[in-house]
Image (cartoon, rainbow, N blue to C red):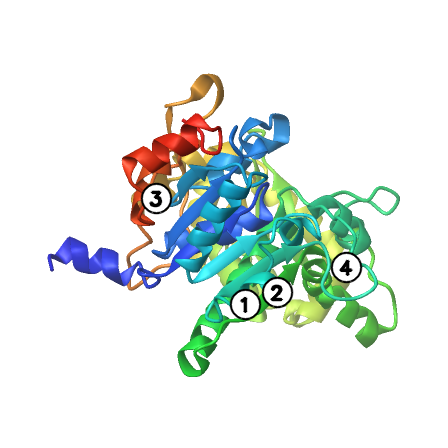
Amino acid sequence: MTGVEETHAQCAPLKGIKVIEFTHMVMGPTAGLILGDLGADVIKVEPLNGDNTRRLQGSGAGYFPMYNRNKRSIALDLKHPEGRKVALDLIHSADIVLENFRPGTMANLGLDYDTLKTSHPELIYCSLKGFLSGPYEHRVALDEVTQMMGGLAYMTGLPDQPMRAGSSVIDITGGMFGVIAILSALHQRQASGRGVHVTSALFETTAFLVGQHMAQQAVSGEAPPPMSVRQSAWAIYDIFDLDSGERVFVGIVSDTLWQRFCAEFALTDWANDNDLATNAGRVTARDSLLADIRTLFAPMSLADLSDRLDRAGLPFSPINRPGDLFEDPHLSASDGLVPVHLTEGIHAGTATQLPRLPIEFGQTKSPLHHDIPATGEHNGEVLQELGLNVEQIAALIERGILNT
């Protein structure tokens, strides 16, 4: 094994695990993306005309390219008995099934866990839903619905204006929890030899994320206000405007950092002021401190201020937009973006770069095993692996069960 092959093997711990994915939108595809990035063979089963997510525009235009690399695509008519037979054969060849359709959909197709568990007892079946078991389990949910239900939108917005977070954070985190359950089930299967049905859900994911605010209320006896008007736990934890029009966030979250800040900017009087030696004292003097620090920072360039804050070891950040990350020097130098090609719309075939999994094995990140697939790109390849010959595949295409 060459050094490159050994590195790829190290970054593909799920190599040899086969996943059949029946998903759309974000939550389910996120789970498949993570498994695929970790080396699993993920086969995405799409409708004949492709996952509808491929055709979303506006804020949904990035869903498919971001969450569907490292997968192979087969486009199959699951409403046709022969299409379902192919899907069942795929499932029986696999270790894991992912699905995130509305409750009852997979049962209507005969592809639910209860139908499959007897004939495939080793199967790990992951459902990604709106709600776990309980009074709401029949409901259909969306990321934004559960952000509203779970209080995250309230905590994100203004007091009278709840606002969803600026990313599909519940879908993505819910998919991650699904993967955690799958990896736990794989470990359990090593001992028991049996699979299990695991479920992750949007609402309970939201509840977990706002748990810190629930705990805050339990501790303080007061309902926490939205983050936009919160009382910060620290005196200096703010965005500062520079005369150049640029902005920077700075957080001074310990007494040690306060002394480093004072030393870097030669603020001897503050460094020697016992009233400012503790965070509690600085919180009391917060208004006057902030006014003076704004005056101190305003004439500096972002580059100079960043150098000094970095030298002092303080947490800081310019106020970026997502598009700025395409040119981020750290992501570029550390191979934090993976090169892929878009598959849909007027930019189909265009190369771009998107974030890799935010993990490393040693100092190596997960490689690209498969580019973003076109609809049904791997029909022949996948079905031949199942044992179908060229004539049988052609017959499925001719009868409209498989796309061309």
Q: Disc 4 versus disc 3: distance between alpha carbons? A: 34 Å
Amino acid residing under circle 1: Lys
Measure the alpha-carbon separation of dots 2 and 4: 17 Å
Sequence-first tag of 1 and 4: 1
List x then y, in percent, for residue 352: 38, 30
Residue 382 numbered mark, or none: 3
First in sequence, mark 2 or 4: give its number: 2
Quadrant for the N terminus, please: bottom left
Residue flagged by tag 2: what amino acid is it? Asp
Q: Residue at x 76, y 72 (%)?
A: 215
Question: Circle 4 is placed at which residue position?
Answer: 137
Residue 43 location, x and y as percent? 42, 47
In this view, 292 is above or below 374: below
Q: What whole-number distance in Å separates the C-alpha atoms at marks 1 and 3?
A: 23 Å
State the CA–CA distance, disc 2 to disc 3: 25 Å
Can residue 312 be seen at all in this image of the molecule?
yes
Instruction: Tell which tag, 4 or 3, sits nearer the viewer.
Output: 3
Q: Specify the farthest residue to the left.
A: 2
Q: Amino acid at mark 3?
A: Val
Q: Secondary structure at mark 2?
A: helix
Contact check, label 1 and label 2, Cβ < 8 Å: yes
